Image (cartoon, rainbow, N blue to C red):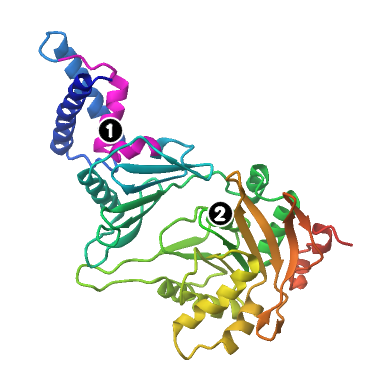
Amino acid sequence: MSSTYADAHASLLESLDALVREAVRRDGVDPQREAGVVRRIAEDVVRSHDERSLTGQVARVPDPPAVVGELVARVSGFGPLQPYLDDASVEEVWINDPSRVFVARDGRHELTPTVLTAAQVDELVERMLKSSGRRIDLSRPFVDAMLPEGHRLHVVLEGISRGFTAVNIRKFTLRASRLPDLVELGTLTAQVARFLDASVRAGLNILVAGGTQAGKTTLLNCLASSIPGTERVVSAEEVYELRFHHPDWVPLQTRHSGLEGTGEVRLRDLVKESLRMRPSRVIVGEVRAEECLDLLLALNAGLPGMCTLHANSAREALVKMCTLPLLAGENIGARFVVPTVASSVDLVVHLGIDHQGARRVNEVVAVPGRVETDVIEAESLFVRQDGELRRQGGMPPRVELYERLGLDVHEILGQA
């Protein structure tokens, strides 16, 4: 594309963009919520322009459908990033600086040819946050938010991020909603899926661990789909990410403080509040700090639950689970926390990403509840060896919970 043609095309887009925005303002259309209306306006504007081109007053639109799509992306979507958000193969989009926009496909990073300006990045961030109801400024230079399509947005303001504002969009792509879906994707085997399904139905407490983008939330969603419909579920998250079908489910989300510095609702507050809502199950999207103590207290009181945690292995997840509650205050000690974790967590499922970018369950570990010299004992149920999840000799705790539902855990595990 020659520079003359590119300049003419850019000028045409700017002219049509102004007409679309004028019509949107005149008709009182919310471009974020009424994208279909914006598309009809863009089609009308492009059609009217082409009719005028027959008289020779203006240049003809070379590719009307493509121009309409670009106008909708500018006005109603997120401009140059919209094609990546619409691309089902893209899992994540991030901006390191305006000239370096990356995407992730199949767990691998790619530098895109998209080049933005600092003003475009600031405008995109402002538009994204407007739809989420959250804010970012010098007093709060980073923010987590949810986009209308369910994508998770994270922004770090310039000054904390050197040189430019850093943007990360983790797309919500529903590739699996039940455990059998994960079997089809190769994340786990049918036997492990059957065992985890039985464990959820029996009411065992499950900790899902792994690194960033390992598939923890997806697995948590699939586990939650196995919760019986007769139970009441309350979930607590930093940002709404859980998506599962259940007839009696109350999702809760944290809230940032307002301009006056008040009104903040922390994850720890949500965990406490969830216990007042008569839950049969409690789910915490991810434990990172002192809210781990409140979750442990709930699990230790007999309330079944699940959560995710960043860790490099199942046993390291248990160690971290023993460390995070210590952040709650000086009066919380390891002598209380370690045995509480041992008696509260029943299973740890650890996920990872293999060398080809595929997400896999690497191990499933049972926690029998014993502690030796401040170390929680764990028994391996399944371990990935030579690329396959293989049954080990361990047994899950609280077998009576399976028997209460008429489930033979020995038969499920293939052990006489």
**Residue 298 location in percent, x, y?**
55, 77
Query: Which label is found at residue 72?
Result: 1
Q: Please identify the quarter of the rendering in which residue 374 is found.
A: bottom right
Mark 2 crowdedness (10 Å alpha carbons): few <14, some 14-19, many ≥20 = many
Q: Residue furthest top?
A: 55
Residue 248 vs 337, above or below: the answer is: above
Relative horizontal placement of residue 317, taking residue 60 as reference (left or right)? right
Based on the picture, tell me whether residue 279 belongs to the magenta stretch: no
- Dot 1: what SS? helix
Q: Please identify the quarter of the rendering in which residue 163 is found.
A: bottom left
Q: Which residue shows up at 22% across the image and 28% down it?
A: 41
Question: Which SS does the magenta portion mostly show?
Answer: helix
Q: Is residue 175 visible?
A: yes
Q: Quadrant of the N terminus?
A: top left
Q: Which residue is mark 2?
A: 214
Relative horizontal placement of residue 93, taking residue 342 as reference (left or right)? left
